[in-house]
Image (cartoon, rainbow, N blue to C red):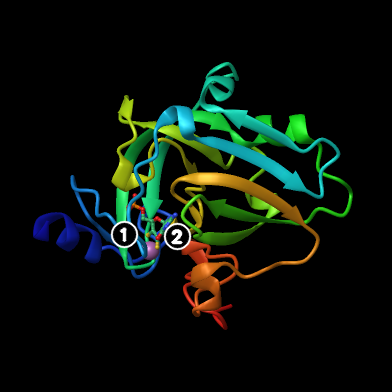
């Protein structure tokens, strides 16, 4: 996408830019980035559990999440490998809906998102509440494909995309931040693209 990249590079990164610092517009494609083998996970075999520091540990199956109020995200996503993708649309359920049911305790301050494959990533609780995080099973109106985390993945689009765990199976609420897979390997504990929090030690 040389034309698009040139267009954005002529503009300084500032309030007018849609691109966080150090990012480029990947265009129409959607790269697949996975540090593990893509699982074959049938919808009927999938479930997600919200547990840890909650009053009511709760498990939802595929049929269960279909009964919840639908919530969609349309906007941009940003990968730490420097691609950003504009105007993507995901459909699913707000993480707020799941947390309201499970009832985080007063001590809950962070979340460890677990994938059924073993991948983990850590997030401040504040980053998955307030309408900023979803469990999604649709992309552009179609079922989310396996390689992109289907049947259901986490979506936290205001943070770098490694925080959006594919094949989500569990949200564990904890009191202290616990680095996940990439965070133990040097990536930032929060990962805000606008503050360019790529690596441990970045502001
Ligand atoms: N379960 C799981 N989730 C994951 C990963 C992974 O390896 N396993 N990779 C992360 C990384 S580093 C990125 S950039 C995004 C990539 O999502 P995509 O392949 O749909 O573009 O998924 C994130 N979620
Ligand atoms: Mo990534």
Residue placed furthest toward the bottom: 201
Element under disc 1: loop
Query: Which mark, by number, is residue 162?
Result: 2
Residue placed furthest toward the right: 106
The residue shown at (36%, 48%) is 39
Q: Is mark 2 within 8 Å of ligand 1?
A: yes
Q: In terms of image quarters, where does ligand 2 lie?
A: bottom left
Residue 49 position, x and y percent, is 65, 40
Q: Residues within 10 Å of mark 2 (few under 14, many from 20)?
A: many
Instruction: From the viewer's side, name the closer residue of 202 and 111.
Output: 111
Q: Earlier in the sequence, mark 1 or mark 2?
A: 1
Q: Is mark 1 within 8 Å of ligand 1?
A: yes
Instruction: From the viewer's side, name the closer residue of 36 and 108.
Output: 36
Element under disc 2: helix
Query: Which mark, by number, is residue 33?
Result: 1
Residue placed furthest toward the left: 2
Q: Residues within 10 Å of mark 1 (few under 14, many from 20)?
A: few
| Discs 1, 2 touching: Cβ within 8 Å | yes
Residue 29 position, x and y percent, is 19, 48
From what the image shows, is residue 41 above or below residue 83? Answer: above
């Amino acid at each position: 996408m040389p034309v698009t990249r040139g267009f954005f590079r002529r503009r300084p990164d500032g309030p007018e830019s849609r691109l966080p610092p150090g990012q480029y517009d990947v265009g129409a494609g959607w790269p697949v980035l996975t540090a593990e083998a893509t699982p074959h996970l049938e919808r009927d075999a999938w479930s997600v559990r919200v547990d840890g520091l909650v009053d009511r540990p709760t498990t939802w199956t595929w049929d269960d999440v279909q009964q919840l109020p639908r919530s969609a995200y349309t906007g941009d996503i940003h990968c730490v490998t420097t691609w950003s993708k504009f105007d993507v649309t995901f459909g699913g359920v707000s993480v707020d809906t799941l947390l309201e049911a499970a009832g985080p305790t007063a001590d809950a301050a962070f979340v460890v998102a677990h994938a059924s494959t073993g991948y983990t990533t850590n997030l401040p609780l504040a980053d998955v509440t307030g309408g900023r995080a979803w469990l999604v099973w649709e992309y552009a109106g179609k079922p989310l494909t396996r390689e992109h985390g289907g049947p259901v993945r986490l979506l936290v689009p205001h943070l770098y995309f490694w925080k959006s765990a594919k094949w989500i199976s569990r949200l564990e609420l904890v009191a202290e931040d616990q680095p996940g897979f990439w965070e133990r390997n040097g990536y930032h504990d929060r990962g805000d693209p606008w503050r360019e929090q790529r690596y441990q030690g970045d502001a």
